[in-house]
Image: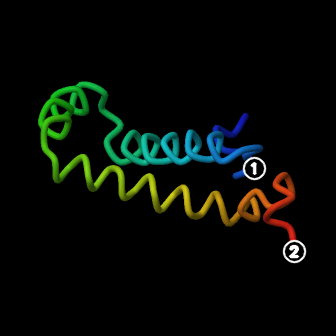
């Protein structure tokens, strides 16, 4: 069986951010596996500023974890290397 998340490696911060979004989306999908239920709920949270801020916060937490796992991309950025 192939894992949808084999590791947290991301070559760039942008890849890391995309992975953070995927983690957030997968958490919702695994929490509520019924697609029809998610489709019913989506219009509500898509138009609620508080819900959108909460979703952004979840992505930010995932991104912080991914950035740390990738040593904040220091290896690919000479300016960040000691």
The image quarter containing residue 12 is top right
Gap between marks 1 and 2, in whole Å?
22 Å
**What is the x, y in percent for residue 10?**
73, 46
**What is the x, y in percent for residue 59?**
44, 52
Could you tell which of marks 1 and 2 lies nearer the N-terminus?
1
**How many numbered dots are placed on residues in this image?**
2
Is 20 on the left-hand or right-hand side of 45?
right
Q: Which mark is residue 82?
A: 2
- Helix, strand, or loop for circle 1? loop
Residue 36 vs residue 8, the one in the foreground: 8
Residue at 35%, 51% in the rendered image: 56
Residue at 56%, 45% in the rendered image: 17
**What is the x, y in percent for residue 52?**
25, 46
Residue 30 vs residue 1, the one in the foreground: 30
The image quarter containing residue 82 is bottom right
For disc 1, the marked residue is 9
Residue at 24%, 25% in the rendered image: 36
Residue at 71%, 62% in the rendered image: 72
Residues under numbered marks 1 and 2 in contact, where contact means CB atoms less than 8 Å apart: no
In the displayed image of the protein, which residue is found farthest to the bottom?
Answer: 82
Q: Which mark is residue 22?
A: none
Q: Nearer the viewer, mark 1 or mark 2?
A: 2
**How packed is label 1: few (under 14 Cα within 10 Å), some, or many (20 or more)?**
some
């Amino acid at each position: 069986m192939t894992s949808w998340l084999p590791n947290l490696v991301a070559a760039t911060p942008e890849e890391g951010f995309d992975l953070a979004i995927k983690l957030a989306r997968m958490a919702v999908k695994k929490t509520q596996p019924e697609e029809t239920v998610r489709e019913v709920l989506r219009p509500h949270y898509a138009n609620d500023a508080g819900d959108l801020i909460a979703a952004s916060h979840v992505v930010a937490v995932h991104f912080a974890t991914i950035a740390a796992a990738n040593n904040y991309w220091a290896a690919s950025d000479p300016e960040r290397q000691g």
